[in-house]
Image (cartoon, helix red, strand yellow):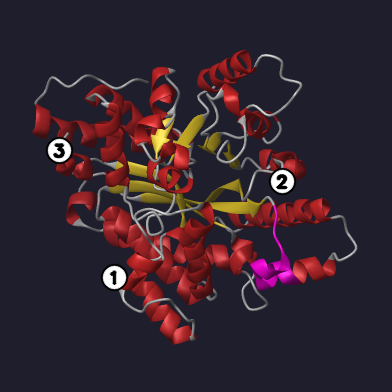
Amino acid sequence: MDRSFLEKLPKTDLHVHLDGCVRPSTLIELARESGIELPSYTEEGLRETVFKDSYDSLNEYLRGFAYTNEVMKTREQLERIAYEVAVDNQLEGVRYIEVRFAPQLHASEEMDIIDSIRAVDDGLGRAQREFNSRPEVAGGEEPPFHYGIIACAMRFFTPSFSDWYRRFCAMHSYTNQEMVFALASLELESAVARARWDEGLPVVGIDLAGSEDGWPAINHLEAFRRAQRHFLKKTVHAGEAYGPESIYQAITELYADRIGHGLTLLDPGSVKSEYIRDPRKYVDSLAGYIADRRITVEVCLTSNQQTNPAFRRLENHPFGKMMQRKLSVTICTDNRTVSNTTVTDELHKAVTTFGLSNYELRNIIVYGFKRSFFPGRYDEKRRYVRQCMEYFEKIENEYFGNDAPSFEE
């Protein structure tokens, strides 16, 4: 399939981390301004030393975040980086993104949790206004650009994670560690609910990120219960570095609407619990439950290749089995800079490796729009999805004629 066709299509990215998408040129400039030491002060040097095409381990992959987070300490820095992430997506035809970040990693005495959300919204909003004022967009010939913000709670943290976490840990020095993690998630959810409903900021949901092994999602149960009561959407990193039980917990205890990665979903060999007597039946039932309720899996092919040796050969990735099971899946980047990828790159990998038909590609694209946490009303979302898919059909007809199959509802 022609790569230029994929680039022109209207696309989404529902799983993209702000701190994984800092332009190398911006990182260099902001590091110099802030006195942050980098391994290299050229883009080529950073690609060789930090942001590689492949990594030897997860620790090496995560190394880049230590640098990017150091230049995300002020409102101005957050706004600029968010603006550039939106622009970079627009340049490759992405019309809707949900940028996720952990506000508590960036909050400080000078910038609280909601301040950091405002800063990200300011950057994304500026990019949106500029794009949507283009004549072809304002005139209705092309669909506009929209976005949402997802706030990440952390499964665990240490005082070294940020100034906010340092102060929070100090205030709860006599409290059980797991309770401290739970309290931090409750604080984040309360801030997100206020930002959403009192201030009208497009923070559309919450996420749970961080290492799964040893840090179960159930520790954050109350925060996600409150999110449910506040009509916030929920996505959870699950099944990335732990068995399918992690996915089960995310959807049954945390009410997850979507699952980030979900790599072990269809793998009975990854089941860890001794109480599950038939792992094959367990994963089959779990996959059926997710499929029936259209809980969407956010698939990130390149980052999975880079962090998990089992998927160095992409043919081994469970995405192919997910398609066979008719699961609702959407293709995402995870981290544009750290993984050195784009949405177009990810779709091209999916199409060429797994032999997707135009019909299957259309369904993946439409799932991205339909399963998004769109910040507007449901009727507005439906109109927007239709507008984007009509534009999809226009591009498709330019390449393949008028006999392309219709997409699934």
Q: Amino acid at mark 2?
A: Trp
* C-alpha gap between disc 3 and disc 2: 43 Å
Q: Which residues are magenta?
A: 156-166
Q: Nearer the viewer, residue 389 or 81?
A: 81
Mark 3 nearby-residue class (10 Å; few <14, some 14–19, many ≥20): few
The answer to which quarter of the image holds residue 381 is top left
Q: Is residue 320 covered in magenta? A: no
**In this picture, is 201 found above or below 298?**
below
Q: Is residue 352 visible?
A: yes
Q: Is residue 202 visible?
A: no
Q: Which residue is mark 2?
A: 215
Q: Nearer the viewer, residue 34 or 189?
A: 34
Q: Residue at x 61, y 35 (%)?
A: 256
Q: Which residue is mark 1?
A: 44
Under tag 3, what secondary structure? Answer: loop
Q: Nearer the viewer, residue 386 or 287?
A: 287
Label 1 or label 3, whichever lies nearer to me, is: 1
The answer to which quarter of the image holds residue 89 is bottom left
Mark 2 nearby-residue class (10 Å; few <14, some 14–19, many ≥20): some
Q: Which residue is mark 3?
A: 2
Q: Amino acid at mark 3?
A: Asp
Q: Residue at x 49, y 74 (%)?
A: 71
Under tag 2, what secondary structure? Answer: loop
Query: Is residue 28 toward the left or the right of residue 141 in the image?
Result: right
